[in-house]
Amino acid sequence: AVWTVVLFCSFALHTAVGQVMFVAQMAFFARVSDPRIGGTYMTLLNTIANLGSKWPQTLVLALVDPFTIPGYVDGFHILNGICVLSGALWFFLARKRSPSPRGKFPENLSHCR
């Protein structure tokens, strides 16, 4: 029963955060789109964003079988560990190099001319 509650709360949090990210992404696309062709450009940006977020999932699922060690470890667990470690490494290496998203860029940089 406890596991079911933890799983449900995890899925609920994931869904909520995903919706917040989607709304923020659409707001950004609306901000940088030219009003004359806004709908078409927003659709293009959303399509590219969707493709960019889906191919890693397909790649990882395709790699499950090659990483499986028969009789010992499922490839999913190995890939999960690799992804967590590479994500943590990326976070610690890239966080000092990336600029702060607030206050560093001129306001007119994000508008179409």
Image (cartoon, rainbow, N blue to C red):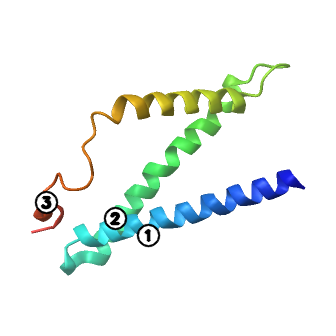
Q: On the image, numbered disc 2 is attached to which residue?
A: 44
Q: Give the residue at x 55% y 27%.
A: 85
Relative side of 19 to 103, left or right: right
Locate the N terminus by quadrant.
bottom right
Q: Position of residue 20 (x, y in %)?
A: 48, 66
Mark 3 vs 1, N-terminal side? 1
Residue type highlighted by circle 1 = Val
Instruction: Using a 10 Å C-alpha cutoff, classify the residue at mark 2 as few (fewer than 14 neighbours), some (14 to 19) or many (20 or more).
Output: few
Q: Gap between marks 2 and 3, in whole Å?
A: 20 Å
Gap in angstroms between the C-alphas marked 2 and 1: 16 Å
Q: Position of residue 57 (x, y in %)?
A: 57, 44
Question: Which of the two discs, 2 and 3, labels the residue nearer the N terminus?
Answer: 2
Callout 3–callout 1 Cβ contact below 8 Å:
no
Residue assigned mark 1: 23
Q: Position of residue 31 (x, y in %)?
A: 25, 71
Above-or-below relation of 67 to 60: above
Q: Could you tell me residue 11's position as x and y percent?
A: 69, 58
